Amino acid sequence: MRQVLTRLRSYVDDTARIDLPRLEGEPRRDPDAVLRVMRALGRSTATEVSVSALARDSSTGDERMGDATVQGYLGALSRVFVIEDQPSWGPHLRSRDRLRKAPRRHFIDPSLAAAAVGADADRLLSDLEYFGQLFESLVVRDLRVYSEPVGGIVRHYRDSAGREVDAIVEFPDGRWIAVEIKLAAAREEDAAASLTRFVENLDTARTPPPEAKVIITGGQYAYTRPDGIHVVPIGALAA
């Protein structure tokens, strides 16, 4: 395990000190500043953290990192396939609630987020909230892997009323599925209620209902609830 962590942290360091400086058409990047941005991203993985918030989190002492600088770093990290945003999804709603359009931020693999913040297994077990963020990012990564060969795009949903869905998998023919992601199986009822509220607010005359509602957990068993919601452990996601 220690060797794996060392290699991951080396990869993060090499990204800042070697990969980004080699990018054609990019201005010179300060490797230490890039690493600070990557740490800030790692702390906020699977959230809709803004560029301004990342800039504040990446600043040191009296040196304030500008929003434009951070935006440039994000673009460069995307070009070398280290990060990938999860775009928002915009269905038609019955209510007048406004859709939130900010993307969720993810590393291309959650292990890089953990490496960027220096997390190990002990830290994750002592910080279950952050562990949950990494788990969500892991599920989003797997959903992308399994859906992209058939043209699927993984988005997320949130509106001004506080309704949100962790992942919307949208297919080219207009079909889609709604996915809530919960590391703890004990959160199943909360996830089911959230999915139900979300679907009830859709204007189904203009946006068809989902092909399926799914809760992906860190549990062991897959089953379908009486309300039709499928509970799927991440280990069975590709089955």
Image: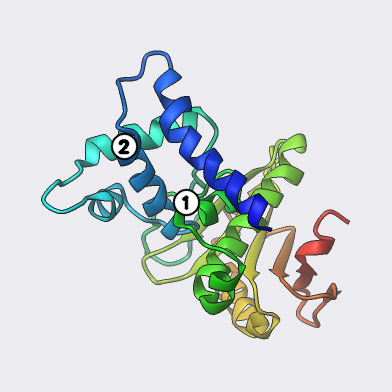
Residue located 45% across and 62% down the image: 158
| Residue type marked 1 | Ala
Report the residue marked by disc 1. 116
Q: Nearer the viewer, residue 10 or 235?
A: 10
Q: Position of residue 182 (x, y in %)?
A: 63, 72
Q: Nearer the viewer, residue 116 or 72?
A: 116
Mark nearest the camera among 2 and 1 is 1
Marks 2 and 1, how far apart at CA: 18 Å
Q: Quadrant of the N terminus?
A: bottom right
Classify 127 as above or below 171.
below
Comes first in the chain, label 2 or label 1? 2
Secondary structure type for disc 2? helix
Classify 231 as above or below 40.
below
Q: Position of residue 33 (x, y in %)?
A: 30, 40
Q: Position of residue 45 (x, y in %)?
A: 48, 56
Does residue 44 appear in this view? Answer: no
Q: Is residue 229 left or right of residue 169?
A: right
Report the residue marked by disc 2. 71
